[in-house]
Structures are given as structure tokens and as C-alpha cells.
Amino acid sequence: MTNAVPHESAIGNADVEAAYARWAPIYDLTFALVMRPGRVAAAAAADRPGGLVLDVGVGTGLELPLFDKATRLVGIDLSRPMLAKAHARVASKRLNQVEGLLVMDAMHLAFPDATFDAVVAPYVLTVVPDPRASLDEWARVVKPGGEIVLVNHVGAERGAVAAIEAWLGRRSASLGWHPQFPWAVIGDWIAARPGMTLAERRPLAPFGLFTLTRIKKAG
């Protein structure tokens, strides 16, 4: 298994912004149901009542109402059209625990070290151009003893699903994400950083299509 996202599937921030500007009007209708189990699991794992959580790739804010009212939240996203919908959701649902929704690059966070009690990033690692640089940044802004919580599709190694993912991978720039994403990207990143440990890895509904990963930062 390779530990690199295939070269032909490389995408940049401009591709992501363009893709999610297209997705924004229909994102909730298209993805809300299939991704809800992952968002529920991510919010439950990252919830820190009384603490501060960074929601990376907050998008339209679908997981924000799933957090405890006592958990303070800051959401970031690269897509302004998606954030506009998140602002509307925060206002309509009176999510007063949301302290900010900011346009920001997940690979270059404008926060000091050790700011957050947890970082949650549902369905984000397959979107960012450089997953390892993103993980480095998320680890930087998490407090000692805190966690990075991921929900992600992990690519198949063989068979029909792997073939479909390879076909989709050649169209990743227009999709806005990497259909081919080996677990080794995450596993090797953890292994190379002594202060980070894998706390949990488990498949999620539907059909184990997505994986919940919890990464603990040494206290």
C-alpha cells in the first residue's frame, strides 16, 4: 500500500473552492443523510463541555447543532458560499456556543499553539491538498491532552471498489476531494510523531464506508 495520495488526483485550494462553490446550493440535500452517522460520531467524540473545539471544514454547519450547548465552537472553511449557509444555520438554530465562523486554510491556521481542547475534521482529509501538513497544523493548535477527531473515507486496496475509486480519482479536481485515500496517510503520520497516539479507529455506517479516527496528543 502506498502512503501517498496518487499524483493524478492532486488538487489545490483553487479546485476545492471552485468545487464547493458548485456544491454549496445542494450540499445538504446531497450529503446530509449519508454523512450524518459520521457527523454524530465525530461530534460525540470531540464534544468538550466547557472547552473550546475547532471544527475544520465546517461547511454548511451540519454538525454544529450536534454538540453540547456548553461546548464552545469555532468553525473554519475555505468556501465562502458554504460558510454563508453555516452562518444562516447558526442564526436560525440560535447556536450561541458558536464563537466564530471564519474563512481559513486548514493547512495554515491563524491560531496560537495549544488553543483548542479538540479539533474535529469530518470529511476533510480527502479534500485538503496536503493531508500531512493539515494534520501538523491541527496537532499544533490542540492543547496537550487534547484530541484530533477525524471522519474519513479510506480507500479500498483492491477489487471493484478500488477500480471505481481509481476512475473517480482522475476526476478529483472537479469533484473537490480524493476518492483514493490510503489509511497509511494517517497511520504513517501518527507513527512518525512520538507525541501523537491512535486512540480509536472504527468503521461507521453506512456499510463501513467511513472511518472514525481519534488521535490523542500527549499531555
Image (tube, rainbow, N blue to C red):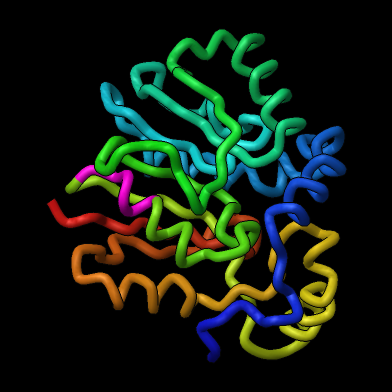
Q: Looking at the picture, does residue 51 appear above or below residue 143? A: above
Q: Residue at x 62, y 86 (%)?
A: 157
Q: Position of residue 164 (x, y in %)?
A: 81, 79
Q: Residue at x 37, y 22 (%)?
A: 72
Residue 109 belongs to the span the image colors magenta: no
131 left or right of 72?
A: right
Q: Position of residue 183 (x, y in %)?
A: 50, 75
Hey, which residue is sitting farthest left in the picture?
Answer: 219
Q: Residue at x 18, y 47 (%)?
A: 144
Q: Nearer the viewer, residue 134 or 119?
A: 134
How many numbered markers are drawn? 0
Q: Position of residue 126 (x, y in %)?
A: 62, 62
Q: Looking at the picture, does residue 22 appear above or below residue 82? A: below
Q: Nearer the viewer, residue 184 or 161?
A: 184
Snapshot quadrant of residue 60: top right
Read off the magenta span. Answer: 138-143
Residue 208 appears anywhere in the view? no
Q: Position of residue 158 (x, y in %)?
A: 67, 90
Q: Residue at x 37, y 40 (%)?
A: 46
Residue 141 belongs to the span the image colors magenta: yes
Q: Looking at the picture, does residue 57 appear above or below residue 183? A: above
168 left or right of 86?
A: right
User: Considering the image in quadrants, where does the N terminus appear?
Assistant: bottom right
Snapshot quadrant of residue 22: top right
Q: Main secondary structure of the magenta part?
A: helix
Residue 20 appears anywhere in the view? yes
